[in-house]
Amino acid sequence: MPRPPREILLRRSALCTPVITLALPGTGRSVTLIGTMHVGQPAYYQAIHDRAAALEAAGALVQYEALYDAPDSEWEKAAPDERAARDALNRGLDYLYSFAGPLFDHLGWAGQRDELRYEPSWEHVDISDLDLIRAAGPAAVLARMNRVSELAAAFDALDPHLEAAAVSLAFRFWRFLPGRYRRPEPGTEHHDQAFEQAVVHRRNQHALAALPPGRDAVLIWGSGHLPGMTSALEQAGFRRRAQEWLPAGRLPGLVKSTATAWAAVHRAAFSRPRKQGSPAPAGGRGEPAGAGPQRCSEDARRGTGPEPRPPRSVRAPRLPARDAEPPEAEL
């Protein structure tokens, strides 16, 4: 069996998502999987729209993902823990977008729902939020949303420059961390597996079951769904015919990200308040002892310290410049 495709490729600071075309031998039927990131540059979403529209003009049916709200009549019959999981799901996503908004503005990125133009002829194929909660289990949804809130809170105190550097370094080095840092906390593994099973595999099955018989199809889904979809289609007899990568957006380069992170650590170390009676630490080169913290406090009074978080509506005029770095990293 061929190796499953990668979800995202980091190529010279550009995050790229795959477009995979599979064909069923002897029938002429094809399925094109367009993987997406849910945030990216506006030009990225225009490219996705244009690709899907061109395939639709050639006779394909375009289908896309998006969880939908279950009717109120169904929620009235839902159990209390299911309604609590829905509230946690909504709060967690709102919290995630609220802290990430300034970061996206800083990078010049926008949300998929704001930038991708969905044509009326495209089909919405997905499950409801209540279906998701029941498939994963309310406890699994609550556990995952607690982790999302903790992550958002950890990043919320950072300015957008440092947030961008942290995200850039995380994409590059996450796979090199020891396994114990990448695994869920002990005792929560079953919640993680149940959540992933519902969010990815359950929805993949729903999407593939809705493929039109005897007609080409285009599926616009998050890139995390593509490995499972590709494997399922190959098991059904399809064969990969082509694969390419669409650049979704640029991150700060490796050198710039490392320098930004190091500067933040240096500022934190030298601006930490000293206990009463403790000796002042030595200053930098050519500075008297204690000059470092004094300089930081003077910067704060003059307003020349770290830049404040920009308002949500402000967009960076351009993306960060490229830095020298390895050509690409597999994620």
Image (spheres, grey):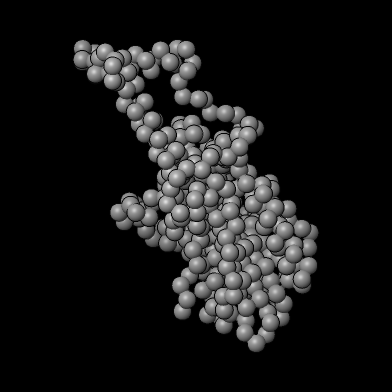
Quadrant in the picture for residue 246: bottom right
Res 155 quadrant in image: top left
Q: Is residue 215 left or right of residue 287?
A: right
Q: Quadrant where the C terminus lies?
A: bottom left
Give the residue furthest to the bottom: 26
Picture quadrant where residue 291 is located = top left
Question: In front here: 258 or 303?
Answer: 258
Residue at the image point whose x is 47% and y is 37% from the top: 163
Q: Residue at x 31, y 26 (%)?
A: 269
> In the image, what residue occupies the spot 38% across and 30% down?
263
Establish if 107 lies above or below 10. above
Judged left or right of residue 294, residue 67 is: right
- From this view, report whether residue 207 is shown above or below residue 176: below
**Residue drawn at x 73%, y 71% as measured from the top left:** 60
Q: How many marks?
A: 0
Q: Is residue 142 visible?
A: no
Q: Quick one: which residue is furthest to the front in this view? A: 324
Q: Position of residue 120 (x, y in %)?
A: 79, 59
Q: Is residue 175 left or right of residue 128?
A: left
Q: Residue 297 appears at what percent x and percent y?
A: 39, 15
Asked if residue 208 is positioned above or below residue 189 in the image, the reply reads: below
Q: Who is closer to the viewer here, 290 or 235?
A: 290
Q: Position of residue 188 (x, y in %)?
A: 37, 55
Residue 328 lies, in percent from the top left, at 46, 55
Please determine whether, in this image, residue 72 is positioned above or below residue 271.
below
Is any part of residue 256 visible from this angle?
yes
